[in-house]
Image (cartoon, helix red, strand yellow):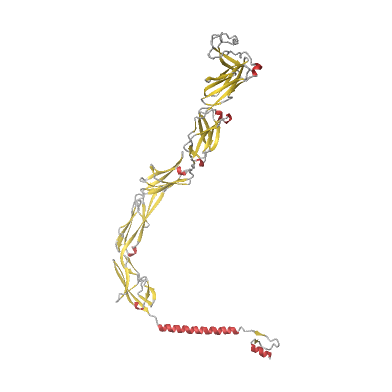
Amino acid sequence: MWPLDFCILSCSDSSSFPWRSCLFTGARRFIKGTSSSRPATMMPSGPPPRVCWTSVVFLLLACCLLSTGAQGQMYQLRVEPKDPVVPFGKPLVVNCSLDCPSPGLIFLETALSKETHSSGLGWAAFRLTNVTGDMELLCSGLCNELQVVGSSNITVYGFPERVELAPLPLWQPVGEQLNLSCLVFGGAPRDHLTVVLLRWEEELGRQPVGKEEPAKVTFMVQPRREDHGTNFSCRSELDLRSQGLELFQNTSGPRKLRTFAMPKTPPRLVFPPFWEMETSWPVNCSLSGLFPASEAHIHLALGNQMLNATVVSQADTLTASATAKIEQEGTQEIVCNVILGVENRETREKLVAYSFQGPNLNLSEPNAAEGTPVTVTCAAGPRVQVMLDGVPAAGPGQPAQLQLKATETDDKRTFFCNATLEVDGVTLHRNRSVQLRVLYGPTIDRAKCPQRLMWKEKTMHILQCQARGNPNPQLQCLREGSKFKVPVGIPFLVLLNYSGTYSCQAASSRGMDKMLVMMDVQGRNPATVNIALGVLAILGLVTLAAASVYVFRVQRQHDIYHLRPRSTRWPLTSTQPVTVAEELS
């Protein structure tokens, strides 16, 4: 009788197993009066390092010294289920059965927490709780005092807790390589776990999941323009169909990709290189080849002042237009900046602001009376050279003057003032003009208004009389005595009673001018007309008679004549019927 419970090590080096296993197969407790029990070949000399309590009567195996032999190889110890696939953390019932005529006790060796579920002759079922990892299960039993061992591999599977697509860049240049990373948290077995990269529902690639936690799987893509605004996502696939289960899928939330394309060329900035102070000038900036142009931003600045620009996006071109005013003379910088995505293009240009005062062109008397002195003055600001009617001033900043006495010929005379300013090596020009009005009395133009007119009755004529003066005079022609007025400057029908002497008067606030015009209207003579008509009738009759005679003579000349065959002495005769009759007689 052994007074102590202890654990013994069961060893097997049989050639029927490809491994060597040493197992704690239980503890032996000798019962009083059991004569069939015998001590084990190997016994611990002291208290065992691990105490194993069991109700088995015979636990001491001699496998460490004994070979299973040919008789032991005839029997098998089956472990069911064979190589099971178990959800993570779930319990599992394992059945160990030995096909032996006189089987002994059966044991299950595992690091998991277990309990006997049920048992019978040649079999035993064990319940494993909280299966959390892959491992090998070993069942051992005795058959004819020989140890028989069976094994089964547990594979634990678990769905990934989550799968994520790593954050995308805010903007991705078109055509540049982009690494997209899928993160997988949890999931087993990893040998059956893969990750798929999706563009919308299109599969771009798939890769197996590594052992690290969390697992990171990277895909390389080359975004296109049409990928702008496209959703990308990751999908995990746990394929357990080879273990008799299903294909389990889990998809991450989508992330939207924003692509852009920007040319290498800088923006095109259009503006006048020289700006006059206190004057508004247009500024335009544009850049083509942008994608998407509608999401690009453009800024215009003059010095430290941001310009309020109107931005227009059309196709792949972005244009900004603004007006600006400079209040300080000198060199200024104008900047156009276009931003798209994480890139920007900028253009900086210089402009020169200048002050060009004048020229101012003045008349001392804009409306001068005839004979009045008039002074014409052309002046401009500092550094400005002026010239009045081709005569330059004494120097820059000096005025130019012209004095005259107003005459009739000076009315509507135009004076010209030209001003020049040198700015940064460039000569700028500016011109002004002014018109002088001279007030003088009316005058009738004798050359265009004849003093004697001879017209026929009932014919259309124009009385071409004109008068000049400032202010413009009113001209009218009245027949003396009757005050009958004839039209001036427009066509009218001349009648016989228009004959007479007319007084033509041109009057204005500056005075009056007069002249006499004699109009002689000749009436028509009926006798003369009748004679002319008679002469024309006679001439017509004579012409008709002459034409008739001419036609008759032409007809006679075209009669037909025949030559007599019997005699050559006869003259040619007409083929008239009378002649023919004489010839026949």
Residue sitting nearer the eye, 318 or 482:
318
Q: Is residue 394 above or below residue 6?
A: below
Q: Position of residue 548 (x, y in %)?
A: 54, 84
- In this picture, residue 266 sits left or right of residue 549: left
Judge from the rendering whether residue 538 lies leftward or rightward of residue 565; answer left or right.
Answer: left
Residue 28 is situated, as x and y percent measured from the top left of the image, at: 56, 12
Figure check: 359 above or below 548: above
Q: Is residue 447 visible?
A: no
Percent x, y of residue 564: 68, 87
Q: Residue furthest right?
A: 566
Q: Does residue 375 lie above or below 291 as drawn?
A: below
Residue in view at x 57 percent, y 22 percent: 95
Q: Residue at x 34, y 64 (%)?
A: 409
Q: Position of residue 197 (x, y in %)?
A: 53, 35
Residue 205: quadrant of the picture: top right
Q: Could you tell whether 296 is left or right of 81 in the image?
A: left
User: Which image quadrant is residue 335 in?
Assistant: top left
Foreground pick, 485 / 137: 137
Quarter of the rendering containing residue 512:
bottom left
Count the numbered circles shown: 0
Quarter of the picture containing the C terminus is bottom right
Q: Quadrant of the N terminus?
A: top right
Residue 356 visible from this viewpoint: yes
